[in-house]
Image (cartoon, rainbow, N blue to C red):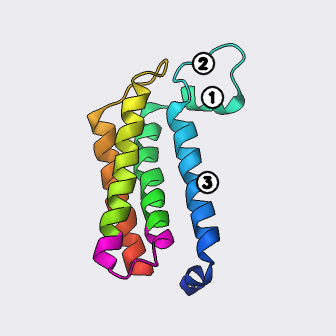
Amino acid sequence: MVRSVEWLLTVPPAWRWLLTLAFVALVIALSVAPGVARPGDSVFEWLVANTATPVQKAMHVAIYAMLAALWFWTLESVDSRILRFALALVVTVGLGALLEWRQTMVPGRFGTLMDVMLNACGAIAGLIMAGLLL
């Protein structure tokens, strides 16, 4: 049985912004965590440093799909669905590109064009799902 997602549209805008910005903060934290385990690292940093590369690549797609869908949902006050889609895509892919650039300065991390493309693919997938569900 498929549950309706109409209840998502009843969530007040302030809560949408809060949830979306909290997820943005999580994405930033994941992106700037060092890629090499060091003595004294938190469990979070250790997990990031020891996540296998194929899992990291899959996470790029999944996380950016969720982020784009959250932006689409949060920007519901934008009347034009096309404009909302475009804004969510630009914000999501822009953040991904910025964080990939930032990773070039983080020990053990590498910012790559491939990861930016994976982020964009995830964002597009998330926006398609959000467009169909919302």
Residue 122, magenta (yes or no): no
Task: Estimate the x, y position of residue 12 in percent, counting from the top left.
Answer: 63, 78
- The foreground one among 40 and 95 is 95
Q: How far is disc 2 from disc 3 in space, using C-alphas?
A: 25 Å
Judging from the image, what secondary structure is the residue with disc 3 in? helix
Q: Which three-letter amino acid code belongs to the residue tagged 2?
A: Ala
Q: How far is disc 3 from disc 1 in space, using C-alphas?
A: 18 Å
Q: Of the residues tagged 2 and 3, which is closer to the observer?
A: 3
Which residue range is magenta in the image?
72-84
* Marks 3 and 1, the one that precedes in the sequence: 3
Q: Which residue is mark 3?
A: 22
Task: Estimate the x, y position of residue 22 in percent, counting from the top left.
Answer: 61, 54
Question: Does the CB distance between marks 3 and 1 fall below 8 Å?
Answer: no
Q: How far is disc 1 from disc 2 in space, using C-alphas?
A: 7 Å
Q: Which three-letter amino acid code belongs to the residue tagged 1?
A: Glu
Q: Which three-letter amino acid code belongs to the residue tagged 3?
A: Ala
Task: Estimate the x, y position of residue 38 in percent, counting from the top left.
Answer: 63, 15
- Residue at 42% x, 61% y: name it: 68
- Residue at 30% x, 72% y: name it: 83
Instruction: Tell me the number on the disc at residue 37.
Output: 2
Callout 3 environment at 10 Å: few (<14), some (14 to 19), or many (20+)?
A: few
Judging from the image, what secondary structure is the residue with disc 2 in? loop
* Marks 1 and 2, the one that precedes in the sequence: 2
Question: Does the CB distance between marks 1 and 2 fall below 8 Å?
Answer: yes
Q: Which residue is mark 1?
A: 45
The quadrant of the image that shows the C terminus is: bottom left
Q: Is residue 125 visible?
A: no
Q: Is residue 86 visible?
A: yes
Q: Quadrant of residue 116?
A: top left
The quadrant of the image that shows the N terminus is: bottom right
Callout 2 environment at 10 Å: few (<14), some (14 to 19), or many (20+)?
A: some
Callout 1 environment at 10 Å: few (<14), some (14 to 19), or many (20+)?
A: some
